[in-house]
Image (cartoon, grey):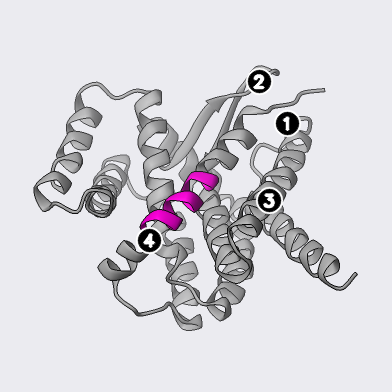
Amino acid sequence: MRIDVVLPSVLFLISAAALLLHTKYGKRIKILLGERKLQVRDAVLMVTVMGAMVTVVAFIPQQAIAILFMFSYSVVLFLFTYVVAPKWYLAVLPPPLFVVLYVSCWNTHLSNFFAVIFAVSISLFLGSSFTWKSVAAFVPLLTLMDVVQVLGTGFMGTAAEKIQVLQLPAMIDLPTFPSGGQGILGLGDIFLVGLLAIQSTHLHGKKFGLSSVIAMTAVFSLTWIIQMNSPIRYFPATVPIAIGWLTAIAAKHLLRYR
């Protein structure tokens, strides 16, 4: 039987880091982005755009993919640096450094490093922008889109393979342990854990937010082990993440009414 502790552990650590950074920098991010919250229509639009982007990436040339991602990530990297160190002359340095590293001495370790930064950044910027109504629309729609694009059209797998060839920091690519092999996890899946953890913290406090991360990671770990021991190559990770979060919510309410 093949098992892996690396990918679930990394998912937990990244999500926990996003949660802790949100506690520290949440007010600063709120000032930077303004008071506006994402509504249900915004959540629907986001999922629609994400699904369309997966389809586009599956068909457009690799060079166009690289340009699109490098521009997007440079913007995110600038904003993340500005939040941590609110000096514009410091925030402008990481984006060109990222581009120079990518075109000169890029490797899997650098890709994973920047992927972690981007995953945390996206969770921080969007985690507080949702309302509970928009989360209630976003999570099932994102999960449905993921299932369709992974198991239905197969475009998610095609897009992932292109991104993996380009070594773009849009996924975490790590060796599995103790079983040999490789495991990959998309930034969208990590963002979903971070988003739900931050929203859970807003609702029930930081302790429950961390508990929800543990629940989501645990269900993901179980599903990942099942996938490793099956012929399935790609599986929509949003499904176990959503189930883990619902499990945490249900457990919270059951304990409240005991």
- Using the numbered discs, state the Cα–Cα distance from disc 4 to disc 3 in whole angstroms: 21 Å
Identify the residue at image location x=84%, y=65%: 255
- Three-letter residue code for mark 3: Met
- Three-letter residue code for mark 2: Phe
Instruction: Assess disc 4: are there few (<14), some (14-19) or many (≥20) residues with their C-alpha within 10 Å of its C-alpha.
Output: many
Q: Earlier in the sequence, mark 1 or mark 4?
A: 4
Q: Main secondary structure of the magenta part?
A: helix
SS of the residue at dot 1? helix
- Using the numbered discs, state the Cα–Cα distance from disc 1 to disc 3 in whole angstroms: 18 Å
Find residue 99 and report its image quarter.
top left
Which residue bears the numbered disc 1?
A: 228
Which residue bears the numbered disc 2?
A: 177
Identify the residue at image location x=73%, y=43%: 218
- Which mark lies nearer to you, 3 or 2? 3
Q: Residue furthest right?
A: 258
Which residue bears the numbered disc 3?
A: 216
- Which mark lies nearer to you, 2 or 4? 4
- Using the numbered discs, state the Cα–Cα distance from disc 1 to disc 4 in whole angstroms: 33 Å
Q: Looking at the picture, how far across and down is residue 13, in whole percent?
A: 55, 39
Instruction: Assess disc 1: are there few (<14), some (14-19) or many (≥20) residues with their C-alpha within 10 Å of its C-alpha.
Output: some
- Which mark lies nearer to you, 2 or 1? 2
- Magenta stretch? 15-26
Q: In the rendered view of the protein, which quadrant contains the C terminus?
A: bottom right
Q: Looking at the picture, how far across and down is residue 50, in whole percent?
A: 45, 62
**In the image, residue 25 lies in the stretch drawn in magenta:** yes
Identify the residue at image location x=28%, y=49%: 84
Q: Which mark is residue 125?
A: 4
